[in-house]
Amino acid sequence: MAKSKTIQFLKKYHKWPSLVLTLFIILFSISGIIMNHRALFSFCEVNRKYLGSEYQYKNWNKAAVKSVVHLNNETSLIYGNIGVWQSTDSLKSFTDFNIGLPEGVDNRKVEKIIETQKGELFAGTLFGLYQYQNKEWNKLELPVKEERIVDFMEIGEGLYILTRSNLLKKVDDTFETVNIPASTDYDGKASLFKTLWEIHSGEAFGILGKLFVDFIGLIFLFLCFSGLVYFFFPDWIKRVKKRGGVAKRKISFLKFNLKWHNHFGNWLIIFLILTTLTGMFLRPPLLIAIAHSRVDKIPFTHLDNPNPWYDQLRRVLYDEDLNRVMLATNEGIYYSDNLFETAPERFEHQPPVSIMGVNVLEKAGEDQYLVGSFSGIFYWMPEKNMIFDYITKRPHVPVRRMGPPIAAHPIAGYLKDKEGREILFDYNLGAGNLSDDTGFVSMPAEIQESPMSLWNLCLEIHTGRIYQYIFGKMYILFIPIAGLTILWILIVGYLLFRKQRKVKTSKTK
């Protein structure tokens, strides 16, 4: 009797939480598989009119604009997640300037554009480096696998290209990798956040690891659908029998379905739990607990990379007054006074930088810089150890607190127009004029209707942000609560299977 009650308890508390979360788990699985292959799905787009108001472009928000480049021929190019748009009337109207870039909004996300002293025009995108020639963008081949371009700098007539992991120098029509030694504070470890991210996606183990995680996603899908079959089929079979019908095939399918539901859940329980656990710590509030933790690199994995700057580089700036190169990473800002002939050194005092990295690094004067990220934007004088909030104009006072890793004004971009007006681009609020109250030009309808990439939609689903329409501000708790519930479902299901098998074995003896 005790065994029967235990099994009934486990059945009850495996079934009902599963039914509540089935749709969410299905969406987690599908979105995760798509996110694991961004380049493959880069041409896929979603019309924003089918999404809620939170996902509409308004006032150049959502990183629509990263910055502007004013060309020598009086033309200006604004660029960002909307691609590249040309203006010949001081940023009052715009025409499409994306010819040559592949179709798909993901392929047209531009991080940086530079016009060199030689008059050459280059664009750094999510998937590579492009040069504007013969009235269109042409992709250039790079000597590195990772081609996500994040910044440029010029020293003399030398052009340097920064990817997320490497610094390259253009030499005639080829590119050379510039060796950046490990920084003076390098500890040989990786951030815990990055480690969990790559384990969760499988990237730590290369393409085979990603495919295995895709397989785990498919297993989650199978468990969901097979669970629904087990929930609905018994009643269907009863109705068929009641009408005098034959239900033999349906019964056989139900048994087959339950068998593999149990087997996959039993055989892969460790990987199902690991995938769930790692995902829980990649979003607030659990992210806050690990944001600044570092761990040893896992040997023989993608993380055990000999490059000490692997996937850390975000911005580079050459200060010709000091003959100094500044290198912004997702873990801090460094400098080199000899173009990396020796190890870069970390600035002792520096402004807050989001875990996602720096979005703005601009020279504002002698020993004066603007540094913007999702932690805000700051006016920084490193030699004087002075930091000011650039919006409030007040000295920055560091406050150690547990809270969201995103400031009230997450900065996605910054530009100066030809009249010297400074425009900030808040990720949520959009364009704001720091110089006066004249504002910024309204977003043209053609640009405002730019679609969202399928990858970004999947990111919103996978991180739970899309559910704020259901849960309001409490959506931030969705991931930890859903994660704990999925862990409960997996563990209870595993215990139920083991208990039932034990009972069945004891009866056959």
Image: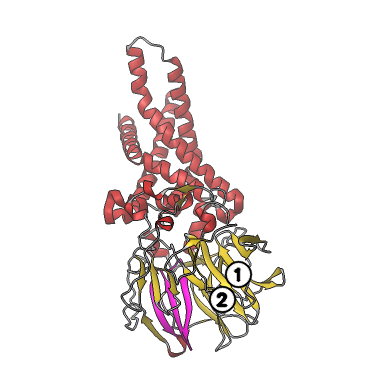
Identify the residue at horizontal 31%, vertical 79% (top origin): 392
At label 1, which amino acid type do we have?
Leu
Relative to 90, is 6 above or below? above
Left or right placement of residue 169 versus residue 444 in this view: right
Q: Is residue 276 visible?
A: yes
At label 2, which amino acid type do we have?
Asn
Whether 378 is among the magenta residues is yes
Viewer-nearest residue: 370 or 49: 49
Disc 2: which residue: 72
Can you give x and y, in whole percent of width and height, for residue 37 in the image?
A: 55, 50
Can you give x and y, in whole percent of width and height, for residue 309 in the image?
A: 58, 70
Q: Secondary structure at mark 1?
A: strand
Q: CA distance from mark 2 to mark 1?
A: 11 Å
Name the image colouring: secondary structure
Magenta span of residues: 354-381
Disc 1: which residue: 121
Can you give x and y, in whole percent of width and height, for residue 306 in the image?
A: 63, 67
Q: Secondary structure at mark 2?
A: loop
Mark 1 or mark 2, which is nearer the start of the sequence? 2
Left or right placement of residue 282 versus residue 167 in this view: left
Asked where in the image residue 418 lies, by quadrant, the reply is bottom left
